[in-house]
Amino acid sequence: MISALKLVPMWVWGVAALIIALAVAAGYQTLRLADVRNEYAAYRADIETKAAEASEQARQTEQQRQRDIDQVRNDAQKQIKLAAADAADAQSAADSLQLEVNKLLAGRAALNSRVAAGGSAIRDLTTVLADLRQRADQRAGDLATIADASRIAGKACERSYDALIK
């Protein structure tokens, strides 16, 4: 058998060794390429998972902010309704008070008819004072309504901003 190996020229052995070396290198590169593909697929899957998680987190944050803003708006509307109800109650009390003033003025008119020449001045002064009180009361009610609405709107704006920067 040794004599048969000696018959094969040396260059054939070189070619055979080269073919074996190329086959081993090709096999190694194939394994390496498969590893790179697996790593790349894992990398892509990781990126897609993280992107989905980030998207979900952003969606949840946006929904929470919208819920907070909706809550602020609903609270502000409730406060405005309460302020309007309070203003209506105050107006009702003012109207009741005005009725009492009118009754007093009517009683005063009977008294003034008994008073001599100075009675006309008293009646005019009483009427002016009652009218002035009514106007002042009406203006105070208007200003209170405006102040309540402004305060409620300002607080709602602050709470909306706070909800956005959470």
Image (tube, rainbow, N blue to C red):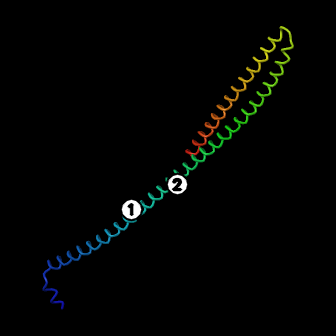
Looking at the image, do the residues carrying marks 1 and 2 touch, with CB atoms under 8 Å apart?
no
In the rendered image of this protein, does residue 13 appear above or below residue 118?
below
Residue in view at x 73 percent, y 34 percent? 92
Residue 165: image x %, image y %? 56, 44
Residue 89: image x %, image y %? 73, 36
Q: Quadrant of the N terminus?
A: bottom left
Q: Nearer the viewer, residue 79 or 63?
A: 79
Residue in view at x 77 percent, y 18 percent? 129
Q: Nearer the viewer, residue 123 or 159?
A: 123
Residue in view at x 67 percent, y 29 percent? 142
For the residues labelled 1 and 2, the Cα–Cα distance comes to 24 Å
Amino acid tagged 1? Arg
- In screen coordinates, is 160 left or right of 127? left
Residue 32 quadrant: bottom left
Q: Residue furthest bottom?
A: 1
Residue 37: image x %, image y %? 34, 67
Secondary structure of the residue carrying numbered label 1? helix
Q: What crowding class fits label 1: few (fewer than 14 Cα within 10 Å), some (14-19), or many (20 or more)?
A: few
Mark 1 or mark 2: whose residue is earlier in sequence: 1
Residue 74 quadrant: top right
Amino acid tagged 2? Gln
- On residue 60, the disc is 2
- In screen coordinates, is 22 left or right of 117? left
In the rendered image of this protein, does residue 127 appear above or below residue 160?
above
Residue in view at x 79 percent, y 17 percent? 126
- On residue 121, the disc is none
In the rendered image of this protein, does residue 95 appear above or below residue 15?
above
- On residue 44, the disc is 1
